[in-house]
Amino acid sequence: MNIQKAREEIIRTIHAYTAQKEDGTYMIPSLRQRPLLLIGPPGIGKTAVMEQAARICQVGFVSYTMTHHTRQSALGLPYIEHRSFGGEEYAVTEYTMSEIIASVYRCMEETGVHNGLLFLDEINCVSETLAPAILQFLQNKTFGSHRLPDGWILAAAGNPPEYNKSVHEFDIATLDRLKYISVEADYSAWRSYAIGEAIHGAILAYLDTHPDQFYLLKQTYASRAFATARGWEDLSCMLKEYEELNYPVEAELIIQYLQDTELAGEFALFYRLYYSREQHLPVAQMLAGEKAAMSACQTLFREDSFEEQLYLVHLILSCINGKLNEWKKSCQQMTRFSDAVDRLVRFQKQNHQFQTTASVVHAFLEKERGILKVRRDHGLSPDSELEEMRQALLEVQKMGYHLRETEGKSCLCQAAVEVLQQKEAACEEAANDILKMLECAIRTMDSELIRPVFTGNSVDEQSSNHLEKIPNHTGKNAALVLFLSSLQQNPAAGIFFKRYPDNSCTPYWERLDFSAREKALKEFLTGLN
């Protein structure tokens, strides 16, 4: 299965394993709660989906990379205990609590969450001395004499043998006690994630026409070459930074991330072509509504090959998706700030001992930063969410500075309202800019074949026939469908269109069957290679 389906399966397993009866016992007893074992290529996102599943299910999360541990750190350190047996005293070896099990209890104590996911990464690459203890843990959920607490689910991940020479194969007796999930690289699944994460447009444009290059492994006796999802994502970050610094992007940089000489050279050439088009095509001007730029881009959609149009579509998508992601971030930041103010007001009402507004804000911030640290230390929130919370607290701190000489709850609430109004106005202005960009993009990409379909309440027979032929059409229609279907994959776009349902894309959402057309487009794009 692909990584998205694997995440769904992990979430369902957590729900099933943590479901309880009326008397508080678990619906599935601990003995029947098989540990999860996720096996798949490196860099595919196995650790990330475990973290996401734990957050979605609102359970604790403790993670360890087992190749970094020894038998002592897993089992605990030995010490001598004196015990009496049959009237005689003996020296007996006991073990301190395992560092891993202790981390689980610490997570429960600091978060107050009693259900959780203990994730052991690279489980099949442990040292020879630790391997027996790991097998015991997978089978019995105990390290030495210390057992994983009830309510905590054991999950593990590893790479197939072809990706790592250190891999130890599990025997049948062990595998028969595990919930085994095999994960494969799937560009379609990763593409949805990539659009939401604003992966560089050149990478998406390249992989749309070369999906077989998304994940590859070439291995001989003397050498090996590979490319992974992690490599593409890290390369995206570096490409953006190099562009910001105005540094040249050469094949020598690409091969540091895509460790295949042929692939690195091919993508370096593709990137130069993409970058040259980005510099010369008037995409920004077109999206701003300049008539000359719109006319120039419209000519490209009418006359150029679809392969050339592909560059233009991805350049447009990069601009719009970037704005959508910024808008989403601003809206989330506004919500975070509003929630922080609500908590601040409740905190002020519950703590009358503080004499000034400044002292209330200071005490509140100390408390909130402690909570933020716990969430960061135990992986209860993703990095993006933690950053949003941190920024919200900074806004509260700024507001506290302005209120340092002012007293009274009304002043605090009034200041918060003013800040929220400013943020809301900024979000609304950004939304209007996006709506204008969408309208300009649609007007530029729309064609004579599609336009008659949406010019009235009825659809004439000729237009209907054209609409049916869109998936197989290599001109403007295919570019438009690619644009709209890619836009749908961005989570920020989904939120935006729910809030602003009356937009330039609405008629197309209602008329186009994207499931069939997107499949046909993928086949066509693959054929361009």
Image (tube, rainbow, N blue to C red):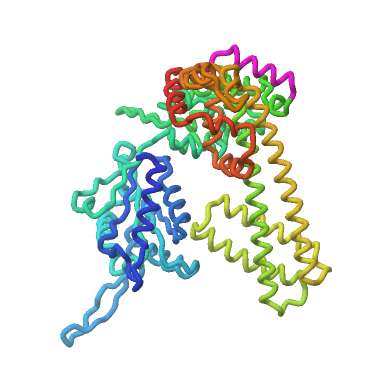
Is 55 left or right of 431, judged from the image as shown? left
Q: Residue furthest top?
A: 303
User: Could you say where residue 341 lies in the image, as x and y percent from the top left?
Assistant: 68, 63
Residue 433 seen from this side:
yes
Q: Predominant secondary structure in magenta?
A: helix
Residue shown at 62%/15% (left/top)? 300
Q: Quadrant of residue 84?
A: bottom left
Camera-side residue of 488 and 322: 488
Percent across and percent down for residue 473 are 49, 17
Residue located 73% across and 55% down the image: 420
Quarter occupied by residue 355: bottom right
Work out whether 486 lies above or below 262. Answer: below
Asked if residue 261 shows in the view, the reply is no
* In the image: residue 267, left or right of residue 23: right
Left-right relation of 344 to 21: right
Is residue 73 shown in magenta? no
Measuring from the top left, give residue 418's x and y in whole percent: 78, 57
Q: Is residue 445 above or below residue 73?
A: above
Residue located 35% across and 60% down the image = 153
| Residue 360 image position (x, y, % from top left) | 72, 71
Q: Nearer the viewer, residue 517 or 265?
A: 517
Rendered view: 137 above or below 502: below
Name the residue at the bottom extreme.
87
Name the image quarter holding the N terminus: top left
Q: Report which quarter residue 100 is drawn in.
A: bottom left
* Most distant residue in the left direction: 86
Give left or right: position of 186 versus 496: left
The part of the chain drawn in magenta is 290-307
